[in-house]
Image (cartoon, grey):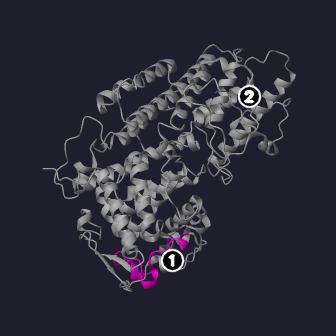
């Protein structure tokens, strides 16, 4: 018999009541808890909120741990600097002192002066020498951020079991000094994810924050630096710590475009493999519940890794088509619990896990479709036709498997979002396959110079289709709550190809459509100024160069042309280019002061853009460090 557990609505209501209760205690004394801990590694057992025992006493001291916690040692460099600098690898790989090697995972050393910081100190200047608990949010803020995570992160990042984690999170919020390091890391990752979601949230439900969002992000990132990559996690990884790392890496992609995200995801994959996360938990004599949680985490890491070819130009680290490891069950959180003896029957319709599973299965379809190993087969065109069949009519599959009604039917927002997400993925695959076909036909016909303008080719139309489909998930309305998530899925192949075509054909109606797509989706609001000098940073720099060249050629052609200007679009007063007739459902978003991307004329100082010059077209010449996959070579060089 399935034990009933709180629903997300119950959890949200409980959080509101708990926040009101704790706000009354905030000024009266210290809040401590007595969490229920099992005997297997000190993990907090899932209990209902009413089972959490709260004690409020004035001036109380919490017993400090007798053993020194690894975070009590003075820090050296940032953890990520240690990871990304070979010269600093040795301190990371050194073992802990002997006294800590055989001891159980100690709790954070806590005394009375390590209380939760009050709201004013939450924005104090960062100090890497300070105690990481000094970065912990106050009780009210922590509860608000947890509520944001449940509403705006968990539905599209389903690696946690909310009813179980709810208990551990509340216990940690009430007394972070007594929490395990892995649990503290998980809560900081949750807060980091919540603020990330708020950075892209334009809703009418503002959350009161003690300081600016970038300040909070930096503080929580600093704490994660201290908690995540330690000898404990390196030598004895725990699922909670790996969940924290996975959440952090996922949300980091919403802020950065550099190779660091790819490196950290590889670290998470290796640590997960070290504890057998890539194997079926039943073969390791694990409980059904723990097996299910491990599957969620592992397949999420695989989905993140699937972006490596397009984001970084490298093949994936893991095999997405692995048929030996099953996917998580299509069930709601209230259908599973830690003490269960058997897994429930999988649901046929929509559940809280459906979006996660749709995304995972889409990646498993994309991987063989975009697999470049068969591009040199005997009959490439036959291979392309067979792959096109794999992506036909995704709506029928979604309706049969997950009960998502057709567009004319009534569906929830998340169901519509999932359908649009799959549609965008299919359109990207159609574009890549069409580009491969055009290249193959050109080689077979031994035609060196195709007189057809690039913007009139079917591949250009399909690339614009992919960009416009992606824009639907970023405009205000449908996926506003999850805009942070879809902001990470930039269509780099389509974006680069459209820019390449616009450089050769800068004017005309088709070019207008291409420019509208580019300007609607060119990444904004991310840490573009701080991109690294390798990997994705160079891809991004190349795209900026392509964009500037295409725009310069367009302006030059317009100055020389005496033709009619019926379809000609002019840059707006602030320098951006827009065409109102392309997007019928919504206007192209006007750039705001906080969107983070410089307007086009401001990029002029970076390049010497003479329209009469013949620009280099080789991606490899501009970025020689990266071993590009064939699809990048096809997009940029047409080979």
Q: Closer to the camera: disc 2 or disc 1?
A: 1
Farthest-out residue, left: 1
Per the picture, the main secondary structure of the magenta-coloured stretch is loop
Q: CA distance from mark 2 to mark 1?
A: 53 Å
Horizontal side of 282 relative to 358 (left or right) equals left
Horizontal side of 108 relative to 53 (left or right) equals right
Q: Nearer the viewer, residue 214 or 73?
A: 214
Q: Position of residue 97 (x, y in %)?
A: 44, 81
Horizontal side of 75 relative to 596 (left or right) equals left
**Residue 240 visible, this angle:** yes
The mark total stands at 2
Q: Position of residue 28 (x, y in %)?
A: 39, 79
- Whether 99 is among the magenta residues is yes
**Would you call the spot at circle 1 few (<14 residues within 10 Å), some (14-19), or many (20 or more)?**
some
> Which corner quadrant holds the C terminus?
top right
Q: Residue at x 67, y 27 (%)?
A: 579
* 55 in relation to 497, above or below: below
Q: Find residue 403 and report its image quarter.
A: top left
Q: Find residue 554 and report its image quarter.
A: top right
Name the residue carrying label 1. Answer: 131
**Would you call the spot at circle 2 few (<14 residues within 10 Å), some (14-19), or many (20 or more)?**
many
Horizontal side of 581 relative to 622 (left or right) equals left
Instruction: Residue 15: give its label.
Output: none
- Whether 567 is among the magenta residues is no
The answer to which of marks 2 and 1 sits earlier in the sequence is 1
**Residue 244 visible, this angle:** no
Q: Nearer the viewer, residue 637 or 293?
A: 293
**Magenta-highlighted residues:** 93-122
Disc 1 secondary structure class? loop
Name the residue carrying label 2. Answer: 503
């Amino acid at each position: 018999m399935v034990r009933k557990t709180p629903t997300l609505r119950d959890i949200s209501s409980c959080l509101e009541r708990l926040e009101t209760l704790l706000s009354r205690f905030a000024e009266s004394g210290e809040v401590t808890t007595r969490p229920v801990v099992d005997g297997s590694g000190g993990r907090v057992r899932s209990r209902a909120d009413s089972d959490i025992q709260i004690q409020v006493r004035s001036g109380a001291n919490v017993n400090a741990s007798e053993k020194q916690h690894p975070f009590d040692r003075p820090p050296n460099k940032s953890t990520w600097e240690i990871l990304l600098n070979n010269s600093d690898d040795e301190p990371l790989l050194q073992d802990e002192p002997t006294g800590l090697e055989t001891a159980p995972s100690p709790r954070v050393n806590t005394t009375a002066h390590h209380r939760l910081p009050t709201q004013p100190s939450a924005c104090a200047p960062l100090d890497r020498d300070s105690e990481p608990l000094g970065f912990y949010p106050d009780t009210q803020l922590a509860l608000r951020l947890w509520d944001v995570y449940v509403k705006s992160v968990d539905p599209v990042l389903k690696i946690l079991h909310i009813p179980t984690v709810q208990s551990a999170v509340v216990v940690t919020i009430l007394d972070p000094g007594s929490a395990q390091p892995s649990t503290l890391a998980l809560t900081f990752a949750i807060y980091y994810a919540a603020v990330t979601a708020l950075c892209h949230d334009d809703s009418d439900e503002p959350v009161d924050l003690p300081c600016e969002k970038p300040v909070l992000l930096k503080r929580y990132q600093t704490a994660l630096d201290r908690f995540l990559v330690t000898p404990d996690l390196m030598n004895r990884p725990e699922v909670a710590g790996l969940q924290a790392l996975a959440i952090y890496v996922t949300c980091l992609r919403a802020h950065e475009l550099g190779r660091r995200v790819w490196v950290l995801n590889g670290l998470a994959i290796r640590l997960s493999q070290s504890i057998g996360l890539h194997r079926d938990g039943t073969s390791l004599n694990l409980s059904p519940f723990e097996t299910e949680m491990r599957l969620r985490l592992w397949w999420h890491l695989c989905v993140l890794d699937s972006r490596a070819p397009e984001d970084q130009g490298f093949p994936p680290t893991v095999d997405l088509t692995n048929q030996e490891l099953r996917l998580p069950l299509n069930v709601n959180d209230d259908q599973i619990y830690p003490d269960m003896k058997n897994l429930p029957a999988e649901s046929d319709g929509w559940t809280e896990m459906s979006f996660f599973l749709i995304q995972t299965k889409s990646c498993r379809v994309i991987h063989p479709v975009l697999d470049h190993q068969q591009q040199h087969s005997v009959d490439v065109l036959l291979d392309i036709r067979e792959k096109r069949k794999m992506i036909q009519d995704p709506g029928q599959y979604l309706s049969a498997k997950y009960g998502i009604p057709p567009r004319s039917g009534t569906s929830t927002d998340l169901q519509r979002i999932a359908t649009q997400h799959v549609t965008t993925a299919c359109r990207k695959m159609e574009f890549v396959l069409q580009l491969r076909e055009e290249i193959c036909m050109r080689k077979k016909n031994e035609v060196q110079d195709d007189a057809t303008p690039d913007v009139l080719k079917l591949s250009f139309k399909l690339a614009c289709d992919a960009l416009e489909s992606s824009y639907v998930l970023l405009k205000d309305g449908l996926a506003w709550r999850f805009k942070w998530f879809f902001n990470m899925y930039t269509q780099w192949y389509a974006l680069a190809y459209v820019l390449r075509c616009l450089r050769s054909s800068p004017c005309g109606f088709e070019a207008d459509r291409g420019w509208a797509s580019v300007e609607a989706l060119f990444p904004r609001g991310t840490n573009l100024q701080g991109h690294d000098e390798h990997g994705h940073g160079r891809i991004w720099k190349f795209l900026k160069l392509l964009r500037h060249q295409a725009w310069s050629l367009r302006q030059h052609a317009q100055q020389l042309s005496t033709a009619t200007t019926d379809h000609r679009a002019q840059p707006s007063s602030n320098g951006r280019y827009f065409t109102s007739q392309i997007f019928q459902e919504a206007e192209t978003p006007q750039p705001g002061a906080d969107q983070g991307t410089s307007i086009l004329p401001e990029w002029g100082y970076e390049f010497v853009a003479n329209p009469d010059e013949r620009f280099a077209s080789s991606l490899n010449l501009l970025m020689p460090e990266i071993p590009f996959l064939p699809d990048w070579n096809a997009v940029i060089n047409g080979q």
